[in-house]
Image (cartoon, grey):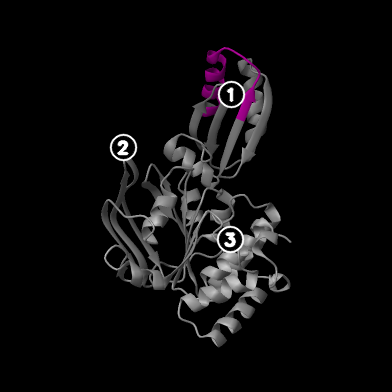
Amino acid sequence: MTAPATPAPAPAPTGEVVIRTEGLTKVYPGGVKAVDGLDLEVYQGEIFGLLGPNGAGKSTTAGMLTTRVLPTGGRALVGGVDVVAHPAAAKQLIGVVPQSNTLDRALTVWENLYFHGRFFGMSAKVARRESDRLLEQFRLEERAKAPVLALSGGMAQRLMVARAVMHRPSILFLDEPTAGLDPQSRIALWEILEELHDDGQTILLTTHYMEEADQLCHRLAIIDHGRVLALDTPEALKASIGADTFVTVSTAPVEPAVRQALADRLTGSLTGVTNMEVTDDGLRFGVRGARGVLPAVLAAADESGATVVDLRAEEPTLETVFIELTGKDLRE
């Protein structure tokens, strides 16, 4: 199984707003501000991502939107329903896949779906039919009678997504949906989510995986410390850096002045250099147009008296955007 070749196309954000937050804030005991005045709009039919490191406020935001966490301030509307004023009505509109496994271990795979449908008011006939349909769609029909404890991590996650869409919610929330899954299971779940989206499902997911956000999301908000740092399509976010290639140079141990001399030579000799940074073990910089850059780095290093031990040129990624915005690694 291979990943889809290209990310999902980004729709123009002109549809109906189905999630809106206005100054949404959550302060935990002790003054810890997990979410700080968040303003978001999510449009019907898009896959919207919240991307950020652990502790950025992604899960708390999802918790407030799904009525599991009570906001300290601000307002959140899901499907036009105020989630604080009318939590029961909001729950009818949403499907939720939390980080932890919440499947009923006393039931079989099929029964987890059937009783979820009955809980949401489906007749026995409709619940049976939908359970069978979803098991087939989610590639779980052969496990219908198995206990959920017999499922692999990827299968259990697919079952949780199937259960979340059993009652046909307007909006599906997924909190770190592929955390802990192996690459094959992750790709299988991506394919499922893209199928749901093709059927018109609006999806909001939180993730700290750059590839996942890039592959699935039409738009995403990069957040840290509970604040939105940037919000756009993945392509536009990467283009905002102003460079089409990032070069990382690692040198053998030398005096800092030697690395600075190398940086000065490259800044003076190369056109389109951006974001030149002298690091503890070399240099990192962006450049517009990568033709001839690597030979130029080696020549400048030789002239500066620095020995290059590693040299890499990469296209901008969402992590590049995050580093430029915060000065730190997305995985921190």
The amino acid beneath tag 1 is: Gly
Task: Identify the residue under disc 1.
Answer: 282
Mark 1 or mark 3: which comes first in sequence? 3
In the displayed structure image, the side of residue 199 where residue 295 appears, left or right: right
Mark 3 or mark 2: which comes first in sequence? 3
Q: Is residue 252 magenta?
A: yes
Q: Is residue 177 above or below residue 45?
A: above
Residue 252 % position (x, y): 66, 18
Instruction: Check disc 1: other Cα within 10 Å, few if <14, some if 14-19, many if 20+.
Output: many
Judged from the image, the secondary structure of the residue bearing numbered disc 2 is: loop
- Quadrant of the frame with the N terminus: bottom right
Q: Is residue 81 above or below residue 56?
A: below
Residue 80 % position (x, y): 31, 71
Instruction: Determine the main secondary structure of the stretch shown in magenta.
Output: helix
For the record, the magenta segment spans 249-267
Q: Residue at x 64, y 52 (%)?
A: 181
Task: Identify the residue under disc 3.
Answer: 7
Residue 328 % position (x, y): 48, 35
Residue 235 % position (x, y): 51, 55
Q: Residue at x 58, y 60 (%)?
A: 7
The amino acid beneath tag 2 is: Gly
Instruction: Looking at the picture, tell me which residue is in the foreground, 31 or 39.
Output: 31
Mark 1 vs mark 2, CA separation in Å:
41 Å
Mark in the foreground, 1 or 3:
3
Mark 3 vs mark 2, CA separation in Å:
41 Å
Task: Identify the residue under disc 2.
Answer: 30
Q: Which mark is residue 184?
A: none
The amino acid beneath tag 3 is: Pro
The answer to whether one can see residue 25 in this image is yes
In the displayed structure image, the side of residue 46 where residue 39 appears, left or right: left
Q: Residue at x 32, y 48 (%)?
A: 26
